[in-house]
Image (cartoon, rainbow, N blue to C red):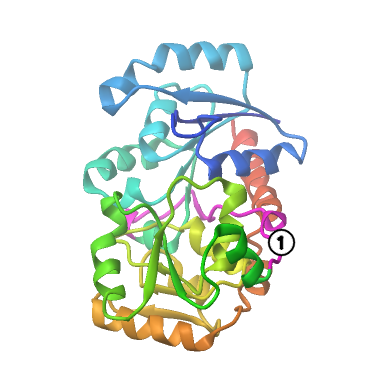
Amino acid sequence: MRVLVVCSYKKQYASHIAPFIEEQVASIQNQDVTVAYFLIKGKGILGYLKELGPMLSEIKQFQPDVIHSHFGLSGLLANLQRRVPVVTTYHGSDINIDSAFRFSKWCIRFSAWNIFVSKKNQQKAASKDKFSILPCGINLEDYLFMEKSQARKHLGWKQEERYVLFAGAFSNKVKNAHLAQTAVEQIHGVHLIEIKGYTRAEMATLYYASDVLLMNSHSEGSPQVIKEAMACGCPIVSVDVGDVAERIDGIEGCYIAEKNPEDIAQKLLLAFDFNGRTDGRRKIDEMELDNNEIAKNLIQIYQNVSNKR
């Protein structure tokens, strides 16, 4: 099986590939699938259209059985050729943001198979056939246990103080940092830490060092940060966004909050009072969200669409 992965070029990463895509691809390769990337450097619909010629050249050279595109606009580009079946994964912003969704609608129509990372995204897309709900997984071995005191010492944090890990960068408008900052201001002596500039290896240390992860985004698909925090047993406070409520349901120390600073502050206090590690890692296992399990599902999808050619 030969799979061409089509996704956008990300200059902020050393590999120029979004980590959740790169990790998913590595898990597929571990199961004897040959993978090549086509990275889209253009921006906007015109920038993407300029990539059609180079993409067709890559297809001719690599001869894939399936193209797996990530995000709707990449999928639309991939579907401008009709020789190789296209599987497209929609990660959330391409469904939740109207300006992107208008392109995703066409991609959904033309793709041989569509993957939505959450049921909410599938429902909004109103897709009725040829789809799966399959979130991106994580590599559990990247999140091995660490004592909170050890993690804080490594980061230079004070052992006795309270730290809330914000699920994104403050500059990312979708993450709604102002709401988080307003909520945290209602609790004395709390540090709000943004996720910005950390390597994947450093993220586990952050989860183990923090008292709670806070997410209050305007929209999400199936956020990786939630699954990573679960794998580390980090308590979670989140608004009902994406598939978060489904993921943390029944986990003691994890709370769904209303989208207002007062309720978020109250839920943060509950997480502080919990004062321990959650049972999130067990639920990751139960939901088969390890990348190796996700890879098995993807390979089955690839085989199905390839056999229909």
Q: Which residues are magenta?
A: 124-146
Q: Position of residue 168 (x, y in %)?
A: 39, 55
Q: Is residue 133 magenta?
A: yes
Q: Position of residue 195 (x, y in %)?
A: 44, 54
Quarter containing the C terminus:
top right
Which residue lies at the image location 76% right of the left edge and 41% below the top edge? 31
Q: Position of residue 243 (x, y in %)?
A: 44, 66
Asked if residue 66 is positioned above or below residue 239 in the image, the reply reads above
Q: Is residue 125 left or right of residue 235?
A: left
Near-viewer residue (49 or 195): 195
Q: Is residue 66 left or right of residue 245?
A: right
Asked if residue 174 is positioned above or below residue 45 in the image, the reply reads below
Quarter containing the N terminus:
top right
Near-viewer residue (134 or 262): 262
**Res. 234 image quadrant:** bottom right
Circle 1 SS class = loop
Q: Is residue 217 left or right of residue 83?
A: left
Asked if residue 263 is positioned above or below residue 116 in the image, the reply reads below
Q: Is the stretch drawn in magenta largely helix, strand or loop?
A: loop
Near-viewer residue (205 or 239): 205
Label tally = 1
Which residue lies at the image location 71% right of the left edge and 61% below the top edge? 144
From the image, tell me which residue sits under label 1: 144
Q: Position of residue 257 (x, y in %)?
A: 34, 79
